[in-house]
Image (cartoon, rainbow, N blue to C red):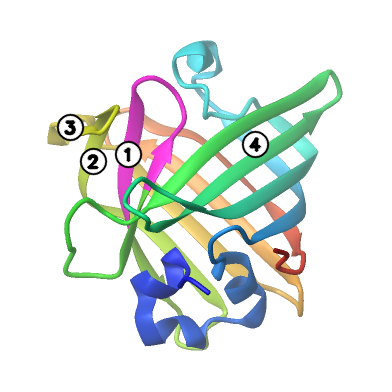
Amino acid sequence: MTTSLYRTALGAEFDRLHPAIQRHYDLGLGQHVTLNANMRAWNRLAFAQPLMPFTPKPGHNLPTIVKNTGVKDALGQVNFEWQREFIYPNGTFRNYTLTTAPPSPQPFAAVMDRFAGFPQVALILELTISKDGSVLNMNTRGAQYMVFGQRLLPLPRFMHMVGIGVERAIGQNEIEISIRISHPLFGELFGYAGQAVVGEIKD
């Protein structure tokens, strides 16, 4: 079995995570796990969604399905694929994110999120774990990029976004999720939060 992206990034620290969070992220090649959630989503720039298709539309109490899969890239490394479905009264909104290793070694545990769209936006996330292992924090740190095919074009600092992601175990199979994306000048841009039940890993 190939080692999962997050286990590789966190090393021995991964084993300190709560079992529900471990199950969410410990996906080898071809394995998948499904989360069933109820979310609140917000978006200050909903009018710009055609340019940023990864941003959710505002809504409350949204049934949400998240399917994560371990997939292989051209170099044979295991990546982490996100497929999300936010179910609104008038239809379903889908978005996609691919999480990979950073393009170069970082002085901290890290992965890189690539948000769907053309061109893609890529943010390096620092991974930290609470002392009791019940919380996984994923916060932007370091370079950010525009992605054109296989090319990464570094973004100037004034264009950097601030991403704060938190997953907190609240039960044997339940987690709280909070994702917030903001900009130092424009303030909070979009995000979502809610509770999810983590399913079993399947091949």
Q: Is residue 39 above or below residue 52?
A: below
Residue at (51, 12) in percent of width and height: 50
Residue 102: x %, y % from top left: 26, 54
Lower sequence index among marks 3 and 1:
1
- The circle on residue 41 is 4
Magenta region includes residue 116 = yes
SS at badge 2: strand
Q: Quadrant of residue 197?
A: bottom right
Lower sequence index among marks 2 and 4:
4
Whole-angstrom CA distance, mark 2 to mark 3, is 6 Å
Per the image, the residue denoted by label 2 is: 144
Left or right? Give the position of 75 relative to 151. Answer: right
SS at badge 1: strand
Lower sequence index among marks 4 and 3:
4
Per the image, the residue denoted by label 3 is: 155
Residue at (67, 75) in percent of width and height: 20
Q: Is residue 54 above or below residue 3?
A: above
Q: Are dots 4 and 3 in contact, CB under 8 Å? A: no
- The amino acid marked with disc number 4 is Ala
- The amino acid marked with disc number 3 is Leu
Classify mark 1: residues with Cα within 10 Å, few (<14), some (14-19) or many (20+): many
Q: Are dots 2 and 3 in contact, CB under 8 Å? A: yes
Q: Which residues are magenta?
A: 113-125
Residue 57: x %, y % from top left: 64, 25
- The circle on residue 122 is 1
Q: Are dots 1 and 4 in contact, CB under 8 Å? A: no
Whole-angstrom CA distance, mark 1 to mark 2, is 6 Å
Whole-angstrom CA distance, mark 3 to mark 1, is 10 Å
SS at badge 4: strand
Q: Are dots 1 and 2 in contact, CB under 8 Å? A: yes
